[in-house]
């Protein structure tokens, strides 16, 4: 008798088959792995973590640029990583290291006509900014988490572009021909979406469950289990940033906001004007991240 | 002194043309001054800084007044918003967002 599988298992199986073809997928930067391990130890001091970061001059410079940018808006200049950790805490520094290194992990020379990575990262940074604006409106306690989740929600697209370029060109051709959402084209061509691939990568990288589920479910936030609120915010942020026409994630359509997510967030239609203005203000503050994509 | 200027999309500006106004980034930092000759590097910087349009010097008689340029831009933005939200009319939330998006983008243009 044939075993029955759930739709979720079927997608997982398709993703597994899809990613089996990927050769040389990037590993989580060793630096982040080390920092993750160190933070788990309650005896770790800021100086020890700073020492690990300081071994990489390029990363040190990036961390200090972010910490001293208007993104955090500290009145006085922070000149050492140790000082930054003392002020911001381990988790925030970990987020800064993750966001600062992710651009390097997926850097490559792009031929004209390929997926536009600059526009892609602008969309992603903008999504993080929109998520922060929504989070502020909702008094969400961890705005840092929202920014990172927004920044990384579409990373699966980069994985596909970099590791299965022929298939991804096929996806983009379907988007172009039908003027449809990229996720619809991915399902048709690959049987799975960038959301599934991104979540799979983050599982491999042992990132937080919240980040994994939000990435997987940003088009269907109700499926994110205990991380539904986070996924709902990223779902709406993705739609808001498209409405602002800031960056481009590979298509020119806008997904319909989920009714259940909208109700659950408790926002009003009259909030949109302010959310767009606040998102724009967040983007101004996040300019330092735009410098990293050059 | 320049006789005329015209507003062009950054994508359509060419190296060798001259900026007719000072160009600043979204944070107000001066990138280059009016009169600067555009180079491929400067144009790339503008794109990176999400500057979508530039005022460039136009030596001949203008094909359109700046006011008309702005109106053309407004119409284009409005049309792009409608295209982006095509098919989303059944959701009252999306209709509200579409109109907020239009107000936001047109408001940015007016600044």
Image (cartoon, coloured by chain):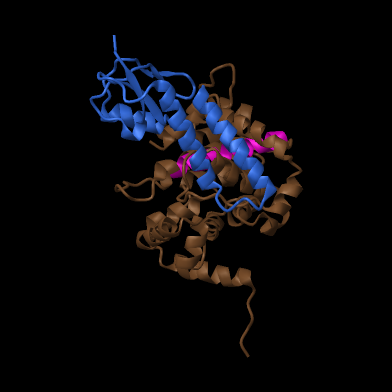
Task: Say which of A196 and B64 sits in front.
Answer: B64
Task: Say which of A68 and A227 sits in front.
Answer: A227
Task: Say which of A287 and B44 sits in front.
Answer: B44
User: Which quarter of the figure has residue B44?
Assistant: top left
Q: Tell me, yes or no, if residue B24 can be seen here.
A: no
Q: Where is residue A241 in the image (x, y as percent from the top left)?
A: 56, 40
Residue A186 falls inside the magenta stretch: no
Q: Which quadrant, please, contains the N terminus of chain A?
A: bottom right
Q: Which quadrant, please, contains the C terminus of chain A?
A: top left
Magenta portion: prevailing SS class: helix
User: Which quarter of the figure has residue A175?
Assistant: bottom left
Left or right, residue B68 beside residue A258? left
Write down the region rendered in magenta.
Answer: A120-137
- Residue, x 58% and y 30% (percent of image)? A282
Q: In this view, does A55 lie above or below A7?
A: above
- Residue, x 39% and y 59% (percent of image)? A173
> Chain A: what color?
brown
Number of marks: 0
Q: Position of residue A251 (x, y in %)?
A: 47, 51
The residue furthest bottom is A1
């Amino acid at each position: 008798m044939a075993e029955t599988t759930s739709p979720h298992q079927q997608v997982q199986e398709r993703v597994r088959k899809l990613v089996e073809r990927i050769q040389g997928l990037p590993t989580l930067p060793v630096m982040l792995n080390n920092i993750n391990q160190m933070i788990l130890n309650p005896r770790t001091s800021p100086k020890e973590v700073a020492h690990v970061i300081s071994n990489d001059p390029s990363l040190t410079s990036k961390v200090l640029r972010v910490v001293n940018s208007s993104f955090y808006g500290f009145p006085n200049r922070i000149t050492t990583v140790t000082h930054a950790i003392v002020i911001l805490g381990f988790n925030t520094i970990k987020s800064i290291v993750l966001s600062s290194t992710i651009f390097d992990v997926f850097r490559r020379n792009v031929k004209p006509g390929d997926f536009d990575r600059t526009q892609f990262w602008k969309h992603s940074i903008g999504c993080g900014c929109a998520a922060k604006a929504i989070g502020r409106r909702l008094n969400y306690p961890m705005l840092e988490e929202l920014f990172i989740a927004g920044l990384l929600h579409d990373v699966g697209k980069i994985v596909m572009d970099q590791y299965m370029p022929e298939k991804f060109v096929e996806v983009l051709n379907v988007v172009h021909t039908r003027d449809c959402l990229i996720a619809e084209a991915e399902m048709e061509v690959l049987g799975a979406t960038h959301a599934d691939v991104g979540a799979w990568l983050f599982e491999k990288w042992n990132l937080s469950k919240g980040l994994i589920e939000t990435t997987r479910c940003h088009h269907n936030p109700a499926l994110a289990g205990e991380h539904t609120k986070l996924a709902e915010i990223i779902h709406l942020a993705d739609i808001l940033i498209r409405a602002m026409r800031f960056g481009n994630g590979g298509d020119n359509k806008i997904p319909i906001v989920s009714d259940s997510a909208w109700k659950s967030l408790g926002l009003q239609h009259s909030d949109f004007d302010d959310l767009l203005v606040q998102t724009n203000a967040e983007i101004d503050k996040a300019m330092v991240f735009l410098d990293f994509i050059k | 002194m320049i006789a005329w200027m015209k507003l062009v999309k950054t994508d359509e500006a060419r190296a060798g043309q001259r900026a007719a106004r000072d160009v600043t980034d979204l944070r107000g930092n001066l990138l280059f001054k009016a009169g600067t000759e555009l180079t491929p590097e400067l144009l790339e910087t503008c794109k990176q800084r999400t500057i979508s349009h530039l005022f460039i010097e136009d030596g001949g008689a203008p094909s359109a007044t700046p006011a008309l340029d702005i109106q053309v831009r407004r119409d284009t933005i409005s049309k792009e918003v409608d295209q982006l939200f095509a098919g989303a009319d059944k959701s009252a939330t999306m209709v509200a967002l579409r109109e907020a998006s239009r107000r936001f983008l047109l408001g940015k243009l007016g600044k």
